[in-house]
Amino acid sequence: MIKHIVFFGLADSAEGKSKAELAEYIKLELENLIHLIPEIKKIEVGINSHNAPKTNYDLALYTEFESMEALNIYIEHPEHKKVADFVGKVRTTRAAVDYEV
């Protein structure tokens, strides 16, 4: 099994939305991918708590896949690319880790 974890820092405002609105929109769009991409075995999206340190990332994505091949199918899937294109317009930072368990 492959676990794919990504953290995003978001702009204070972009694409006509506040940071909070961006985070909610991206969360919904990412979570919907489980219905569109069968390779996703599990997905969770968390928005950083308002009480957390300001140095934290704004959004966390946790996904599970059966194999690295399945992860690569997800990455190249047109529905994922749509969400990734939007995120690319509004993110300020990104960090990711993929590991096998």
Image (spheres, rainbow, N blue to C red):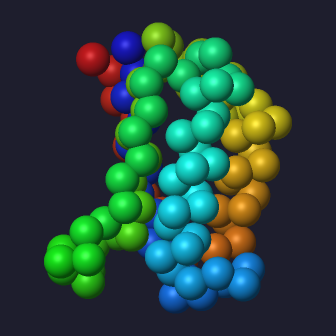
Residue shown at the point (63%, 48%) measured from the top left:
29
Residue shown at the point (38%, 14%) measured from the top left:
1
Q: Position of residue 4 (x, y in %)?
A: 42, 35
Q: Quadrant of the C terminus?
A: top left
Residue shown at the point (57%, 50%) measured from the top left:
28
Q: Position of residue 25 (x, y in %)?
A: 60, 61
Q: Residue furthest bottom?
A: 12
Residue 72 visible in the shown view = no
Residue 95 visible in the shown view = yes
Quarter of the rendering containing residue 63: top left
Q: Is residue 101 above or below residue 19?
A: above
| Of 84 and 46, the residue lying toward us | 46
Q: Is residue 63 above or below residue 92?
A: above
Q: Is residue 16 above or below residue 95?
A: below
Q: Residue furthest right?
A: 78
Q: Position of residue 83 (x, y in %)?
A: 70, 51
Q: Is residue 36 left or right of residue 40?
A: right
Numbered label tally? 0
Residue shown at the point (44%, 33%) measured from the top left:
43
Q: Is residue 76 left or right of residue 58?
A: right
Q: Is residue 67 left or right of residue 44?
A: right
Q: Position of residue 68 (x, y in %)?
A: 52, 19
